[in-house]
Amino acid sequence: MKEERSAELFAKAQRFMPGGVNSPVRAFRNVGRIPRFIKKAKGARIFDEDGNEYIDYVCSWGPGILGHAFPSVVKAAQEACEDGLTFGAPTEKEVEIAEIISRLVPAMEMMRLVNSGTEAVMSAIRAARGFTKRDKIIKFKGCYHGHSDGLLVKAGSAALTTAVPDSAGVPEGCTKDTLVALYNDEESVENLFKANEGKIAAVIVEPVAANMGVVLPKDGFLKFLRRITEENGALLIFDEVITGFRLSIGGAAEFFGIKPDMITLGKIVGGGMPVGAYGGRRDIMSVVSPLGTVYQAGTLSGNPVATAVGIETLKYLDSHREIYGEIGRKTARLADAYRNAFGNSARVNQIGSLMSVFFTDKDVTDYESTQTSDTKRYARYFSFMLDRGIYLAPSQFEAMFVSAAHTDGDVERTIALATEFASVEAH
């Protein structure tokens, strides 16, 4: 495949943007390639500046559940643009999308629209602290909740240590109240609650971890989190920036039958536009200004174009719930075929339309086991597939997304190429 134009653009981009990109994973450094500069997309296909066509399994990191440039969604955006791009004032569309979200996700009795998942999580944690009048939060190693200072942390020598910054530019004081537990490890959570009795405001978790690759919660783990937070007067926050409206129409909360105190959303809630939302119990959200003393604001929050696109996307998903069964079936077909192709040399985690292949012979159930994966082999796999028209996440530790636009033919083409790669590697 040609890559001359992408290479030219990448060289130019590096003069103006750090690493030539506006988000690190796009740089393709983890896979040793030049990033593809995308020109357009339609359905399950993306097209780069060199004219190459790819079956897309990134789907803009999740929101493309209906496929790219879905006709009614594009029409909604066009019509909204005709009325103006931004007002910085209330609109009917804000009310409509909030009503839809609350109906589909009952835990979100009251909410605020924001502009990204990072902003949603940052704001939810501030509200949780304001409501509980406590400072400490628990997050899980390997779970990503955006790039706000207090959440860019890593565990120290053990789960009970105070978290230390995982990025330059983050003062230690910003992370001193962030405690790090181990995903799928109940004991690590119990120990943190015992060591910080009466001090923990909230536990925040990706109900299905999707930022260390896809890692499913063990049976009973989410129920345990619901129980231990209730027993200790802390809030349970589901970060559903990935799983919201993708795992099911009601997200992970519906899928697993658990009602958290707060939920953060992004990605699909805006149909691909820059939108996020955070919300939860009415009494908790009532601490947010102007009702309460927790301040949060945003000029572009509830943008009329973004809300129009989100409304159309959510309405379509709500009226075509069969989509979830279909994309789940196709993803399960991919997962089963990958397991057959790679045998014991890989592990494939899949739930709904989310999937990851890990090149390891160990079961992947937490952050530590994700680190056993052979990232060099993943880079070879990525390049093999990219050069044959399959666009995957340029990192071992990201999810693979399937959309309603992917056909059975797309799936079979992908399986054939992955099987070919497995055969080449074996010899």
Image: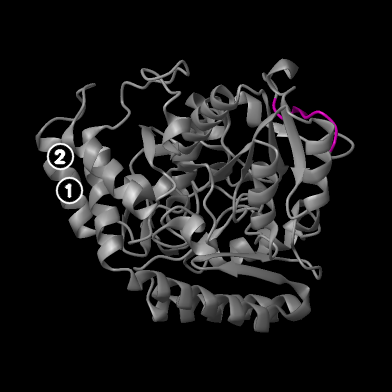
Gap in Å between the C-alphas at discs 2 and 1?
6 Å
Q: Percent position (x, y) of residue 205? A: 62, 45
Q: Nearer the viewer, residue 346 or 150?
A: 150
Span highlighted in magenta in the image = 160-167
Quickly name the residue at label 1.
76
Residue 263, relative to residue 165: is it above or below? below
Please give the residue where the numbered disc 2 appears in the rendered image. 80
Look at 60% across and 61% down and name the residue there. Answer: 383
| Residue reaching furthest to the right | 157
Image: 276 above or below 418: above
Residue sitting at x 45%, y 39% = 281
The answer to whether residue 69 is seen in the rendering is no
Residue 426, x across and y down, in percent: 76, 79
Q: Position of residue 170 (x, y in %)?
A: 68, 20
Q: How many residues crowd mark 2 within 10 Å: few (<14), some (14–19), many (20+)?
A: some
Q: Are marks 2 and 1 in contact (CB under 8 Å)?
A: yes
Q: Position of residue 217 (x, y in %)?
A: 66, 60
Q: Main secondary structure of the magenta part?
A: loop
